[in-house]
Image (cartoon, rainbow, N blue to C red):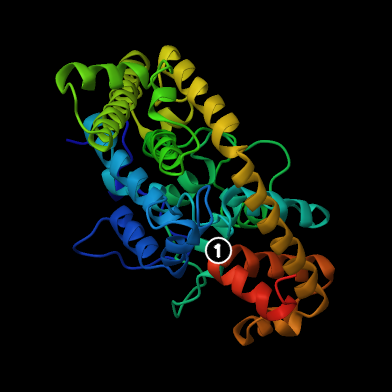
Amino acid sequence: MRAVYACDPQKSRGRLFPEEESHFRSPFQRDRDRIIHASAFRRLKHKTQVFVEHEGDYYRTRLTHTLEVAQVGRTIAGVLGLDVGLTEAVALAHDLGHPPFGHTGEDALHALMAPHGGFDHNAQAIRIVTSLERHYAEFDGLNLTWETLEGIAKHNGPVEGALPYSLADYNARHDLELHTHASAEAQVAALSDDVAYNNHDLMDGLRARLFKDADLEELALTGPSFAEVDRIYPGLDPIRRRHEALRRVFGVMVEDVIAVSQERLAEAKPESAEAVRNLGYPVVGFSDGVQEKIQEVRQFLFERMYRAPSVVEMRERVTRVVEALFPHFMAHPEHLPVDWQHDVAEAQGKTALARIVADYIAGMTDRFALQVHEELLGGS
C-alpha cells in the first residue's frame, strides 16, 4: 500500500514535453525502463568503481553497482510504502554521469573544465537524460518526469551555491526546486548507494588483497558479523565465511535505514510527498551509531584501498590519459566522431567547445578511453 508521503505517479508534475502515458506502466515505471534502455546505461558495464575495468572479472563496475543500489532501494522503498518504480528510476540513473576511471576521471575532468564551469557527475547525469541521449523523434534526452529528474539532481540533498553548468542550464528551463530536499524515494536511492558501495568496496579490496579478513574483524561495523558467523559455522571455509559475514553487514545497514526512517516518518507525520521535501531535513538515514561505524569503514577504505600504492599508480596513469585527451580534442575537434560534428559546428566559443569535449570524454568507457588514447596519442 502506498503511504500518504509517497510520490503518486498519477499526480506527477509531468514531463517537459507532454506525452500520452502508457496504459500498462506508471510514469515512473516508464522512466525506469527508458533509463535501462539508454546508451549511457549500457556503457556502465565498462566503467569502474575503483579498479580499472580490465584488472579483473570480479571487481564491481558501475553497472553491477547500479543494479545493487536498485535492489537495495526496492527493498527499503517497499517496506516504507514508497513508490518502488520512482526509487528504481533514480537508483538506476544515479551514476550515468560518471566519466571513465571512476572518481579519478571525474577529478581530472573537473580540473580541466574549471575555466568552463567545472564538471560534476550528478549534473552530467541530468545532461545525459535531458540532452545527450538522442534517440526519440520529438525531443532530445529521455523526457523523464519531474520527480525522476528531481531525484537525480538532488538525491544527496539540496543543491545550493554555484550550480554546475549542466544542472544550471536545465534548471533554467525546468525548475527542479533545488533548494529543497528530494522525495523520500530519492532519499532511499541515496542511502542505498551508501549501503552498496561500502559493502562491495570491502569485498573488492579483499579480492585485491589490499587487506585481509582479519582487518575487518577489528572494525565496529564488520567485526560482529564475522564473530557471529564463527559462532554459527565454526570452521567454515574462508570464502564462505567472508561472504556470510559481509552479507550480514549488508543486512545491518539496510535494517538500520528502515528502522530509522520509519521512526522519522512516524515523528514528522508528513501528509504528502511535498511535505517530505519541505521538512528541512532528510527522513531517510542511518542511526548515529551506525553512521559512526560506517565512517570508520570509510576511513579504513581510504587508507588501505583508495590510497594503496597500486591504486594510486593506476590513478596517476589514467589521469594522464584524460589530461591528454582533453587538450587534443580541443585542438583537433575534427577528431571527434562524425555524429558529434554538428554540435562542434554550432559551438560558439571555447567554453561551448570544451563542454562538447567533456561530454564526449565523460561518455567513454575505461577501455574505449585507453583505446582512443593509444590510437591518437600512441599511449604516451
Residue 281 visible: no
Residue at disc 1, secondary structure: helix
- Residue 354 appears left or right of 360: right
Q: Which residue is mark 1?
A: 366
Quadrant of the rendered structure where residue 161 is?
A: top right
Q: Locate residue 15, reporting x and y percent.
A: 43, 59
Residue 380: name its quadrant.
bottom right
- Determine whether 45 is above or below 314 in the image: below
Which residue is depicted at the point 50% across and 70% down?
A: 133
In the foreground, 346 or 145: 346
53 in relation to 70, above or below: below
Answer whether residue 76 is visible to the viewer in this image: yes
Residue drawn at point x = 23 percent, y = 59 percent: 25
Compared across the picture, whether 206 is left or right of 320 comes to left
The percent coordinates of residue 122 (x first, y second) are: 57, 49
Task: Choose top left, top right, bottom left or bottom right for residue 255.
Answer: top left
- Label 1 is placed on what type of residue? Asp
* The N terminus lies in quadrant: top left
